[in-house]
Amino acid sequence: MLSAIIVGGAILIRPSDFDRCLAVISAEIYRRDQTATLDPREVEAQAARICSGNEPK
C-alpha cells in the first residue's frame, strides 16, 4: 500500500509537458525583457496562454 502511494505521488509531482513549456517560455520572456520591470504573475499568465495555444493574435 505504501509503495502504491509513493508511486502515485511521484507521478503527480512529475513535471508535465505543460509545466516544462511554462518554464521555458517564462525564462524566454524574462530574458528578452531584462530592462523592463516584469510582474511575475503576468509573465506566468502570458506563458500559460502561449503554452495552451491561446496567445492573443
Image (cartoon, rainbow, N blue to C red):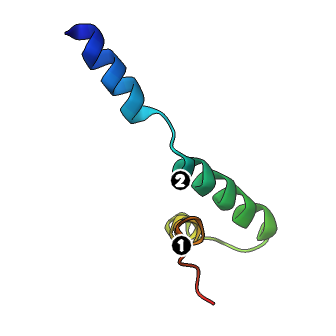
Question: Which SS class for mark 1?
Answer: helix
Count of numbered marks? 2
Few, some or many residues within 10 Å of mark 2 (<14, 14–19, 20+): few
Quadrant of the snapshot with the N terminus: top left
Circle 2 residue: 18
Residue 55 percent location from the top left of the image: 58, 79
User: Residue 9 occupies which quadrant of the picture?
Assistant: top left
Residue at 53%, 53% (x, y): give it: 18
The disc placed on residue 49 is 1
Residue type marked 2? Phe
Mark 1 or mark 2, earlier in chain: 2
Question: Which SS class for mark 2?
Answer: helix
Residue type marked 1? Arg
Of the pair 52 and 25, the residue shown nearer to us: 52
Please identify the residue farthest to the top as the structure is shown.
2
Few, some or many residues within 10 Å of mark 1 (<14, 14–19, 20+): some
CA–CA distance between discs 1 and 2? 11 Å
Are dots 1 and 2 in contact, CB under 8 Å?
no
Residue at 79%, 71% (x, y): give it: 35
Residue at 64%, 60% (x, y): give it: 26
14 relative position to 38: left or right: left
Residue 49 percent location from the top left of the image: 53, 72
